[in-house]
Every structure is written in C-alpha cells, then in structure tokens.
Amino acid sequence: MKRIFLTATLLVVAGLAVVAQAATVDSIFTPTAVVVSHENDDVKNNSYEVMKAMYEANGLHFQDPRAPRFLFLDRKGRVALGIGGYVKATMSADVAGISPNPDFVTYSIPTPPQPDMRSQFQMDASTSRLFFKLVGRNTAVGDFSVYIESDFRGTAAGYYGMRLRKAYIDFWRLRIGRAWSTFTDVASLPPTIDFQGPSGTAIAMNTMLQYLQPLGNHWKMAVAVEVATPSYTTRQQYNRFINQRIPDVPSFVQYEWDEGNSHIRLSNLFRALSYRNLVADKNKYVIGWATQLSGVIKASSHFTLYFQGSYGRGYATYLNDLGGNGFDLVSGEHNGGMVAPYAMGVVGGVQYTIIPGLFVSASYSQCRLFDEPTMASTTYHYAQYVVANAFYSPFANCQIGIEYLYGNRRNYNDVSGDAHRINAMIQYNF
C-alpha cells in the first residue's frame, strides 16, 4: 500500500510540474516546480490557475528573480507558496579610473582623475536573491498574492548584510507595501550585469499604496501614493531637512501589445518637498514634478528595443546617478529658501537574440543636472554610460555573461573623468 501511495504521489507531482512548466512566460530561464501536497484530482483546475498566477512575470526588471523552482500547494489547490531566487557571482576589472565600488557608478568617477584610483579587481556575490511568493484565491478578495524578496546588500562590512528589497500584497486592483515605484518602468531597461545600471535610469523602490486599472485589452493605468526618501543640500544656519508631510504621487498610462511583451508608457510624478527655513523660522515646501516616456518594443523574434526619457525638477531621488546625492532640493540665496533643480535622464538600448538562450545587447544612457546659481563649479553636470554585453544559458536555470562598460563624468567647471570596466557573471536560478 505504501508503494502504491508513493507511486501515485510521484505521478501527481510530475503532472503538476508539467502544468507549471507550460504556464511560465519566462523565455530566458526554464523554471520547474515541485508540488508537495495535494488531496485528489479535483484540485487540478484550481492548481492550474494558481500556478499560472505564480509564474506570471510581465513587467520584471532584467535582474529580478524569475518564477520559483520550488512550489508548495495546499490541500484544496487554492493557495501555493513558491520559494526561489538565484546565486549570482560577478568578477570585474577596472581600467583608467573608478571609485572602490562593486557597481559601476558614473557619479563616483573621480574628477579630476586620481592616479591611485585608476585600476582595481573585484569579486562580489552580494546581489544574490531569495524570495517567497504566496498566491491564491479567497472568496472575500478574489485572487491575491504576497511577495517578499531580499538580497545581501545590507550595511554589514563587505556588503554582505541581508537586506529587504520588496515586501507587498496584491489583491483586487491594489498593491500595498514596498516595490518598484509606479514612476519606474523597469521592463523598459536594457539588460546589464552591472547592478547599478544606466546613469539616466528613472528607478526607485518605495513603500506605496497603488491602484491599477485595466482599460480594455491593450490599455491600463495606475496611480499611487508613495513614501520616498528625499536628499537635500542644505546650508547651515539657513535651512535644514525635515520629515516629509506629503507623499509622492506617481501615475502612468500604458498601451501594450504582443501579449504584453511590448508597451509604451507615459508616467508622471508630483512631489511636495518639505524643509525648514531657519531664517524665517518656518516649515516650507517646494513642488517637484517629472514626466517620462518609456517602453520596450519587441520588433521581431530577434530584435528588442528599450527606451526611457524623463525630465523634471526635484526628482533626483528617482534618477540612478543623482539619488542620495543631495539634489532633490539645494539651498537658494541667503533668505533661507531652497530650490528644486531641473534634471534629465535618457536611456536607449537594443537586444539581439542569436539563438534561444544566447543574446547580445548594447545601450547608451545620460543623466544631466541643470545649473542653479548656488551650486559650486565642481558640482556634477552630466554623466554618460555605455554598455555592451552578451548572455548565454548553457543549461536550464544557469546563465553566464560578459560585458564592457564605459563611463564619463563632467562637472560644471568642465573637469571630467573616464572609467572602463569588464564584468563577468555566472548565475544559477532556483
């Protein structure tokens, strides 16, 4: 009897794993699933729909984990728990100037160049990921999912402290928790080994309450309230940073086709940035805003195009090169006021798939900060980021890659610095 039970269990496990395999939308990694609990064959319809939701992967950043390798199904086939992630090891060699950083951050390129920072060799595994995803159906809220993800870029020495990246709940048309910002179109970003990515990328991870509304077969829109972390350049005795009183309000409208593989998105962002004017002894705020046009177009079975272009003021936190460097607000004149500088980011890239599992890509990006009278002449003016790479999957769930990176930073006094890097990667998904 025990042998019969074990044989039947293995057959059901194999059958459900095949269903999960068919349900995936990932074209780079081929996920498999192991279902470890079931009741009887009547759960198959529920199981198929639940696992299909588990394997939905549209809208992911290239570096986000794909569908989970391991899957646990409850007795009624209504709730599934997936466990997945990847181990990623990178190796890099720098030539002609870059700061000691495992990522290729063009903002950090020394200007003027420094002889003692011209080259280095690094290895890193801190961008490996681990996630848990729960999906299911409930009579009260309908379909729902719960997701939590971490990497190892915490504050511990050597970047190896565990860090929360995402933690959110999706139900009905709502998303509550920490995830990619509504202003961030991560699917429109070209692939890179470099964890930092292109300098002009509009990208942020915020805590949010988001509402997503489908508009027919090809259109959808979203609006959210989000909590970001602004970064100011204040002046002692004139102004200082205070806690924010109004959340950011990003939104987008998107047209998509080719089963969601291609889309064009128009995004907008509204911010009210609070600060303390020490001269007037009052709390003040400055309006920040930004708009972005982005998209990904699968032009053929071989060619894919990526693009982003954003412009606004007071949104430096959302720009890859400027985030955290004090450019959301800068101190104005001697009346204690602060101003929101204008900024711009552009990204463009192309990917060519040679054969399934082997592709090459190249992209260009620029981030630009526009002048304010109170900025020093040594302030960052713009940076350029160029990348060319190749990725290959020698077998299921494994990917290797190599890339060349070039960066250039120029300040307002026209002093500039360059950097070159070779990156290599091996990644195994589970």
Image (tube, rainbow, N blue to C red):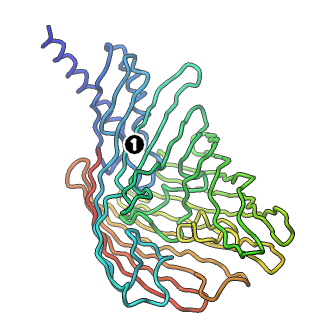
Of residues 23 and 270, the one nearer the viewer is 270
- For residue 282, above or below residue 256: below
Residue that badge 1 annotates: 131
The quadrant where residue 242 appears = bottom right
Whole-percent x and y of residue 109?
46, 81
The quadrant where residue 38 appears = top left
Q: In this orientation, does residue 402 appear?
A: no
Of residues 211 and 94, the one nearer the viewer is 94
In this view, the residue farthest toward the front is 237
Whole-percent x and y of residue 207?
59, 48
Q: Secondary structure at mark 1?
A: strand
Q: Number of marks in the image?
A: 1
Residue at the location (31% across, 75% down)? 422
Residue type at mark 1 is: Phe
In this view, the residue farthest toward the top is 1
In this view, the residue farthest toward the right is 280
Q: Is residue 254 left or right of residue 280?
A: left
The quadrant where residue 344 appears = bottom right
Q: In this orientation, does residue 300 appear?
A: yes
Q: Is residue 111 left or right of residue 40?
A: right
**Quadrant of image for the N terminus:** top left
Q: Is residue 119 left or right of residue 189?
A: left
